[in-house]
Image (tube, grey):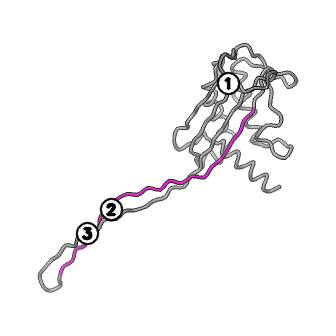
Amino acid sequence: MKSLLLNAVLFGTALSLAGCASQPSISSQSRPNVDFAAYKTYGWVTPLATDKAGYSTMITGHFKSAVQNEMAARGYVYDANNPDLQVNFYSNIENRSETYSSPTMSVGYYGYRGGFGYGLGIPVYGSDVETRNYKVGTVNIDIVDAKRKELVWEGVLEGTLSKKAMENPGAAIKYAVSQIYTRYPVAARTAAPAQ
């Protein structure tokens, strides 16, 4: 049980891209010849990828809220029973490290006490090695044609996670989802409702 809760928290941090140390990378792809304006309603894929062991996680709640805002802003209406589209979302967190090497040079210097004579040593070249560990989060949002059971759109965001984002997953998920939806084929008609 403790492991499941820890995994749910890690999923949340993976999604917490609002405080990215660098700008996140966003990509998307659409199925050709799909008229997204023809869809009117949406619902959820069952089970959602962020759910665990038959229950809905807090991360799922944050995602649902953020996606509902974006879908409503585009004129879609939620329909649990017979939606035109089904939405699913995934998150992943990965530990990465980068090693940097910078050249260094040291030179020896010596002198005599009580006498004269000074010397300069031969330059010695080397390098300083520095390793930076960090976390990278990836968020996927899938939009599926419910009747044909085929993926019609996918948006992906990847970015470095900051401590601030990991401490506030709700705000971070809202930010990540809003950024992904900037690539959605239907533009927002209204501003997404405030949470």
Please say if 21 is above or below 43. below
* Tag 2: amino acid: Thr
**In the rendered view, does 31 fall on the left or right side of 47?**
left
Q: Which residue is mark 3?
A: 107
Helix, strand or loop at label 2? It is strand
Q: Nearer the viewer, residue 52 or 152?
A: 152
Disc sitting over residue 192 in the figure? 1
Q: Which residue is mark 2?
A: 104
Q: Residue furthest bottom?
A: 114
Q: Position of residue 88 (x, y in %)?
A: 75, 33
Stretch in magenta: 88-111
**In the rendered view, does 122 fall on the left or right side of 173?**
left
Residue at horizontal 37%, vertical 62%?
Answer: 127
Disc on the earlier residue, 1 or 3: 3
Q: Quadrant location of residue 130?
A: bottom left
Q: Are marks 1 and 2 in contact (CB under 8 Å)?
A: no
